[in-house]
Amino acid sequence: MIRIGICEDDSKQRQNIREHVERALFKRTEYMISEYSSGKQVVDAIEKDDFPVDLLLLDINMNEVDGLITADYIRKHETDVDIIFVTVSGEHVYEGYLYKAYNYLLKNDIERRLEVELNRYLDEIERVSVCMEVTINGTKVKIPISKIYYLESNARKVIAHVNGEDIEFYSKLDDLETMLSAAGFFRVHQSYLVNGQYVNSMSRDKIVVNNEFLPISRKYYERMKSEGKFS
């Protein structure tokens, strides 16, 4: 699944962009779209730690908090989101590079270019999806997904139990579940997300992952049963 954010203060323009996004992604992948009518809404969402967005389509010319101020805030606070600027003119294209924008699209060219850029973005995501990138003590570290036995939530941190070591980093298991479900990971408990390729056996109240016993909660047992993970 890809999570798209659309930040545009004109409701008609925002709806137009949304329709193009939906048309582009419908046959390609599952998606979720969040809409923001101002840069301030984006900043507020980030401050509240409620910003479920992988790629932000960001208008530049907005009142109060414009797209450049918003992008500056995003980069200074190291928010993990890619940006495509969507605007009426090319006058800020070089500032787009300053804020590490994935691309810069003109509104009068949306119909022709947005689908192409979204597909190019997804192609690149798929090429690097074999690794999960996390930040540990300010350093970005790539963890091979195929080497992760399971992920464990511990307060505000997550522990990746990997072949040969345990790697601890700040994240939310809910976000990782969304990101890794397509790679064969599934939730068995509020605190555990397991890699299906390392499951040895399962029963009503426990699962064995790489010869280690983990609990299965009733909530996730019922979900897995409905999804056919239990015979």
Image (tube, helix red, strand yellow):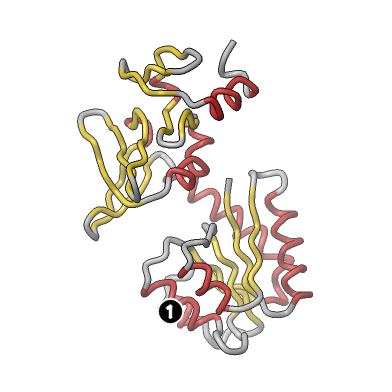
Tell me if residue 160 comes above or below residue 223 in the rendering. below
Tell me if 78 is positioned left or right of 140 in this view: right
Q: Using the image as rendered, state which of residue 217 and residue 58 is in the foreground.
A: 217
Q: Using the image as rendered, state which of residue 126 and residue 69 is in the foreground.
A: 69
Percent of width and height locating residue 192 = 41, 33
Outermost residue, front side: 218
Q: Residue at 49% of width from left, 40% of height from top?
A: 177
Of the 4 image quadrants, the one containing the C terminus is: top right
Tell me if 8 is positioned left or right of 23 in this view: left
Instruction: Tell me the SS state at disc 1.
Output: helix
Of the 4 image quadrants, the one containing the N terminus is: top right
Q: Residue at 72% of width from left, 77% of height from top?
A: 108
Q: Using the image as rendered, state which of residue 54 and residue 154 is in the foreground.
A: 154
Give the total of numbered labels.
1
Label 1 neighbourhood size at 10 Å, few (<14), some (14-19), many (20+)? few
Percent of width and height locating residue 139 = 24, 57
Percent of width and height locating residue 45 = 53, 68
Specify the amino acid type for callout 1: Asp
Percent of width and height locating residue 42 = 55, 72
Q: Residue at 56% of width from left, 78% of height from top?
A: 39
Q: Quadrant of residue 212?
A: top left
Tell me if 105 is positioned left or right of 17 in this view: left
Tell me if 77 is positioned left or right of 8 in this view: left
Tell me if residue 56 comes above or below residue 69 in the rendering. above
Q: Which residue is mark 1?
A: 72
Q: Quadrant of residue 219?
A: top right
Q: Residue at 32% of width from left, 48% of height from top?
A: 157
